[in-house]
Image: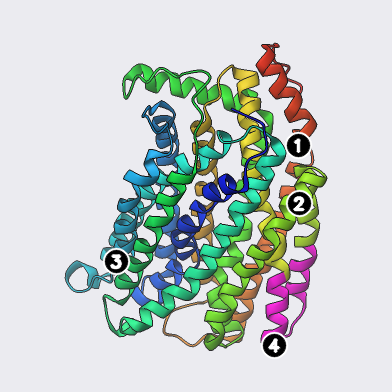
């Protein structure tokens, strides 16, 4: 693996893949919960439970898929083939998530709950089969910490471009397909989005180069020995890799807290601002702000350190969330400005997470003697999915607690409660993530030292936390 600067073409060739992934992910994150509660008519508590159970399954699947990807051997590499051969399954499963079954068992809440759960589990499994190998590539295509910060910045540019595009595209396609009166409108829209993603994944495959492994894992397949080896490997990583555990803890807190803003946004526009006509403007606005500020956070990480950039994002987020919470105005212009301020800060966590995570792969090689790229990314995805699942579950119960019921007029207290959900809960997360990140010390200089020590065969030191 080379530490030489990557050509811009290679950076963009890898980063463009996240445009395709976020056509799916931002739809699930921003639009699926309102689809469950307002189109399917699923109780918000049951809808939240769907997200919890599906995310728990997703986290388990991510770890398994990471282990399988690490042992995959083809002439195209370990990770790149998944972008071509598994991506069509994601498009099919995505469309199934937006089917509106009716009649028979689906006339009851239990039937709708079961269908929503099974379809989302299927979708998340297919998604992980492609996304875990894709993310693992970031630790293979460059070994330079600054290049990885640049890669993470470009990745987020494409990620939020895809998210902004789909938040406009999905409602438009649904309307063109007949609106909510057509039971297949959402399926048609989701199918079109899935087809759009496929050439993006194929382009990523063509433009990405995966260097050969310096140290080969024995591709022993699905034997009990392989399972035992992988379990022991994971145990050692969790015990010895202090930087990885801090990154895990921060992404759990971030995903649990800050995603409340995204999940509540549609409800906030519809019921707190009472401007559903602005939904297709304000929801993409948050992602456009993410898109615009992604390069800024990558730049701060290169100029200072990833830890300092994270703490700066904490300060910015705290001020923005406090202002959003305390300013009583429901003027859409003021709401848009506050939402932009929050989103501009929050994108920092995503850029920095994906920039930090590959660095922990080298640290893992230093303290354990093996890289295990996909296992690291699989565990990170498990941590993130666990937090997102708890987030969805908690959000559903919070909606119930403030009195939100589909088809029933929203009271002023409920409208205010939606605003509290999307500001106060994340504000708590800001404080917690700052406390966790304070002790992170794997900056550019330390990463370079660890990489050199690993290459020279120097015995690891365990002082890093």
**Residue at disc 4, secondary structure:** loop
Q: Please tell me whether mark 2 or mark 1 is closer to you in this view.
A: 2
Q: Position of residue 205 (x, y in %)?
A: 43, 45
Q: Please tell me whether mark 4 or mark 2 is closer to you in this view.
A: 2
Q: Which residues are magenta?
A: 318-340
The answer to whether residue 465 of the structure is visible from this angle is no
Measure the alpha-carbon separation of dots 2 and 3: 46 Å
Q: What residue do we see at 61% from left, 25% from top?
A: 364
Please say whether residue 141 is one of the residues in the magenta stretch.
no
Whether residue 228 sits left or right of residue 289 in the image: it is left
The residue pinned by badge 4 equals 331
Please say whether residue 330 is one of the residues in the magenta stretch.
yes
Q: Residue furthest left?
A: 104
The residue pinned by badge 2 equals 299
The residue pinned by badge 1 equals 440
* Mark nearer the N terminus (2 vs 1): 2
Quadrant hosting residue 362: top right
**Residue at disc 2, secondary structure:** helix
The answer to whether residue 299 of the structure is visible from this angle is yes
């Amino acid at each position: 693996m080379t530490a030489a600067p990557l050509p811009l073409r290679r950076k963009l060739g890898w980063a463009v893949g996240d445009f395709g992934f976020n056509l799916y992910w931002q739809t699930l994150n921003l639009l699926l919960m309102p689809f469950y509660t307002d189109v399917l008519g699923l109780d918000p508590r049951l809808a939240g439970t769907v997200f919890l159970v599906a995310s728990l399954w997703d986290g388990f699947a991510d770890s398994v898929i990471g282990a399988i990807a690490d042992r995959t051997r083809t002439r195209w590499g370990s990770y790149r083939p998944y972008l071509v051969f598994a991506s069509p399954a994601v498009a099919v499963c995505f469309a199934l998530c937006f089917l509106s079954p009716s009649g028979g068992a689906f006339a009851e809440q239990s039937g709708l709950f079961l269908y929503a759960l099974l379809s989302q589990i299927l979708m998340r499994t297919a998604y992980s089969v492609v996304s875990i190998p894709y993310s693992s590539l970031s630790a293979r295509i460059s070994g330079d910490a600054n290049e990885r910060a640049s890669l993470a910045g470009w990745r987020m540019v494409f990620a939020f471009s895809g998210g902004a595009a789909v938040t406009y595209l999905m409602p438009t396609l649904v309307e063109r397909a007949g609106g909510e009166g057509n039971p297949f409108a959402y399926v048609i829209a989701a199918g079109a989005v899935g087809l759009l993603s496929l050439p993006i994944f194929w382009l990523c495959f063509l433009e990405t180069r995966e260097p050969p492994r310096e140290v080969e894992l024995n591709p022993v397949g699905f034997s009990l020995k392989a399972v035992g080896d992988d379990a022991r490997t994971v145990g050692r990583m969790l015990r010895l890799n202090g930087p990885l555990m801090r990154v895990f803890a921060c992404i759990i807190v971030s995903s649990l807290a800050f995603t409340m803003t995204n999940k509540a946004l549609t409800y906030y526009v519809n019921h707190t601002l009472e401007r559903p006509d602005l939904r297709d403007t304000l929801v993409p606005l948050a992602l456009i702000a993410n898109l615009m500020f992604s390069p800024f956070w990558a730049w701060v990480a290169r100029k200072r350190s990833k830890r300092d950039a994270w703490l700066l994002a904490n300060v910015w987020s705290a001020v923005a969330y406090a202002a959003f919470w305390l300013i009583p105005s429901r003027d859409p212009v003021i709401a848009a400005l506050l939402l932009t301020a929050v989103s501009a800060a929050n994108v920092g966590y995503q850029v920095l997470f994906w920039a930090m995570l590959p660095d922990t792969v080298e640290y893992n090689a230093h303290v354990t003697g093996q890289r295990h790229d996909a296992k690291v990314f699989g565990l990170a995805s498990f941590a993130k999915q666990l937090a997102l699942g708890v987030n969805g579950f908690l959000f559903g119960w919070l909606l119930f607690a403030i009195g939100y019921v589909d088809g029933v007029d929203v009271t002023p207290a409920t409208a205010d409660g939606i605003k509290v959900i999307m500001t106060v809960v994340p504000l708590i997360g800001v404080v917690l993530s700052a406390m966790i990140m304070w002790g992170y010390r794997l900056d550019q200089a330390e990463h370079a030292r660890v990489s050199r020590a690993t290459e020279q065969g120097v015995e690891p030191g365990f002082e890093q936390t």
